Image: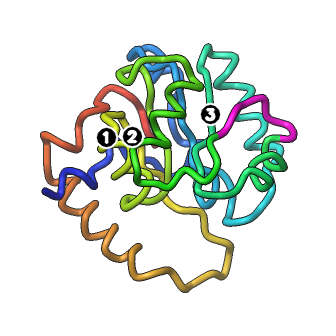
Amino acid sequence: MLERFYPWGYARSVFAIDYGKLYERGFRGLVFDVDNTLVHHGDPSTPEVDDLFRRVQALGFKTVLLSDNDAERLKGFTANIDTPFVADAGKPDPRGYEEALRLLGVPKHEAVVIGDQVFTDIRGANAAGLASILVHFIQVPGETRIGKKRYVEKALLAVWRRSKRWSRRLEGVEIR
């Protein structure tokens, strides 16, 4: 029952993922959440994020953003990033993930979802039959308040880490 919340892997940030190893493992599509995954909630894209997209696309990955934000937010965010997006995705509903796959043009087994929330990003990826990497949510320096869901997520991750069956699905992919 808890498995529907378990990611395939965990990373401190999107910048700590070895995308080359993911590519070697046969992944060809990256589905990114935006807020608190790529940037702090509501912030515009950064030069580092723009560079990340250029680097992963140069490796051969197709990319797409999947977000519950509206299209205007995502249009602004992608001003310097050549990637399509799915706005108002209704995560964790699998339909948004299926639309992201359609835009990527890759089969399910070649796509990986990267997001910061167990209850939306990861649960939706699992419901859609996609691999996923949970990243630690972005916090602004000095920010001390986090939502109650983050404490539940922390407990779920503790159980997930003890499970060899569920926590080692991306074994061989260096995630720092």
Q: Check disc 3 and report the residue beneath it.
A: 64
Quadrant that contains the N terminus = bottom left
**Labels 1 and 2: the sequence-earlier one:** 1
Q: Is residue 45 above or below residue 104?
A: below
Crowdedness near tag 2: few (<14), some (14–19) or many (≥20) residues, C-alpha within 10 Å: many
**Labels 2 and 3: the sequence-earlier one:** 3
Q: Residue at x 59, y 26 (%)?
A: 103
Q: Residue at x 66, y 58 (%)?
A: 69
Q: Are marks 1 and 2 in contact (CB under 8 Å)?
A: yes
Q: Secondary structure at mark 2?
A: strand
Q: Check disc 2 and report the residue beneath it.
A: 132
- Three-letter amino acid code at the position of disc 2: Ser
Q: Is residue 129 above or below residue 137?
A: above
Crowdedness near tag 1: few (<14), some (14–19) or many (≥20) residues, C-alpha within 10 Å: many
> How far separated are the C-alphas under marks 1 and 2?
5 Å
- In depth, the one of 51 and 100 nearer the eye is 100
Magenta stretch in the rendered image: 79-85
Q: Secondary structure at mark 3?
A: strand
* Numbered label attached to residue 8: 1
Crowdedness near tag 3: few (<14), some (14–19) or many (≥20) residues, C-alpha within 10 Å: many
- Three-letter amino acid code at the position of disc 3: Val
